[in-house]
Image (cartoon, rainbow, N blue to C red):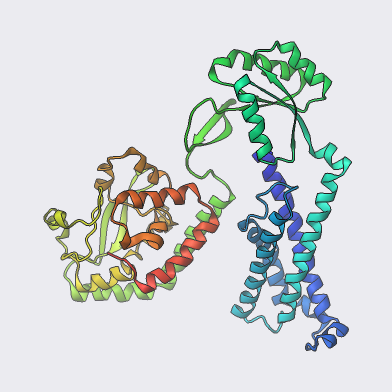
Amino acid sequence: MLRRDRQIRTQIQQLGDACVVAVSFWIAYVLRANTEITAWLHLEQIAPTSFNSTDAIWLYVALIPIAPLILESQGFYNRPVLAPRRMILWPLFKGCLLTTVGLVLAIYAFRLSLSVPRGVTIFFGVISFVLLLVKEELLRAVIKSKFGQSQYKRRFVLVGARDELEKMQHDLEGRRDDTVAIIAQFDLAQPLPELIHLLHEHSIYGVILNAKRTYFDQIENIIKACELEGVEVWLVADFFNTQISKTTFDELLGRPLLIFSTVPETSWQSLVKQVLDFFGALLALICLSWLFGIIALLIKLTSPGPVFFRQQRSGINGTPFKLYKFRTMVTNAEQFKHELEAMNEMRGPVFKVTNDPRVTRIGKILRRYSLDELPQLWNVLRGDMSLVGPRPLPVDEVKRFNDLAHRRRLSVKPGLTCLWQIQGRNQISDFKDWVRLDLEYIDNWSLWLDLKILLKTIPAVFVGTGAK
């Protein structure tokens, strides 16, 4: 299935699942308020009108969009429609369980237990799982029906060089794509009228065209022939041997473009990330303003010099920006850096020393618990950085990269925390391992990964593991 079709299908499923979740929450209230059920389960009676309370409605409205997002985070939508049931049951169970646990935590956090009894959440978890499973079974039955197959299945001719056809068909069959049915194969060496005959004989929906650069003339003729027939052409653009780039299609001034990119593409998740960065940094700056004042006072009382340390760091695509930190070293620290080069514990262009003699007494404490990084919330608010992303390096260290592949870590905004912070930190002594974790983050980025990194950063900071 094409990505555009998969996205539309996912959005429709999420909308349907949101409706199911809404119905499940309402049914849970109805059952909890039923006198016979409460008497049978020995539960305290609640008023039938309690569902209309302000707290319940607020929770109800918040639950509807959140539940499908939780299901998506568990991979519930990342599967063929006619996938084996085990690929449905386990992600669905985890999604419903996490939604129910989140509902319970929200009730206790906001003290909503009077408006939303515990029995409601238990009923909701069970009912939502059952109803969503029933919906999936009904959908499966409809798609497997003769009507569903006629609407859902698309008939294709696979076109390409002889040595590519079998491999392409094997790959398509291995992906278990429910929407694509390969009716026939057509070798590019065959005459074009034979392809046109196949289109007519089998009522073909589209042509999947896989060819190398040497066949561009034939490709053009086939596309023109399909244009006349009103038949779609899917051109497999793997005639360029890229290794990690992801290709997307767009247009510029009306001209078609193939875009090769190694960074996450613009999506609703990336937009949400920007919103979370701005409001998360703003909220943190407001809530931690008292701590800023205390740290600034301690720095002033224990060491002469400015409170803040400013340095040019490399941002997205290497763009320099001014990074802010609480000063943890003596004011003339940069002048003594060359004298400490022999003590550098990192292999590569970066400089790390565990017991740096330039660090002040209060600076050691700030570094241990990463409190010196707090002013970078201002960089996040300004848009120079993100809450999660590869740590920004000084401009001079970036210029010393001896492997151009290391610059790919500059393809996204730098962040306050990253995989390196929570998985390696002081255990990493080679810059290559640091880069490997950064590229792992870039290649697997999702909003859910950002949230997990943020959650794991909190205990790492409190324990003070590995700060240098």
The answer to which image quadrant residue 55 occupies is bottom right
The reply to whether residue 57 is in sight is yes
Q: Residue at x 29, y 71 (%)?
A: 366
Q: How many marks?
A: 0
- In the rendered image, which quarter contains the C terminus? bottom left
Percent position of residue 119, x then y: 74, 80
Q: Residue at x 79, y 85 (%)?
A: 46
Percent position of residue 270, x then y: 53, 50
The answer to which image quadrant residue 187 occupies is top right
The reply to whether residue 418 is in sight is no
Up the image or down, 348 lies above or below 230; here it is below
Percent position of residue 165, x then y: 64, 25
- In the rendered image, which quarter contains the N terminus? top right
- Horizontally, residue 338 falls left or right of residue 204, namely left
- Is 250 or 99 nearer to us in this picture? 99
Q: Residue at x 33, y 64 (%)?
A: 373
Q: Residue at x 83, y 76 (%)?
A: 30
- Horizontally, residue 128 falls left or right of residue 327, namely right
Up the image or down, 440 lies above or below 93; here it is above
Up the image or down, 186 lies above or below 385; here it is above
- Horizontally, residue 148 falls left or right of residue 428, namely right
Percent position of residue 227, x then y: 72, 19
Up the image or down, 15 lies above or below 254; here it is below
- Horizontally, residue 262 falls left or right of residue 144, namely left
- Is 240 or 337 nearer to us in this picture? 240
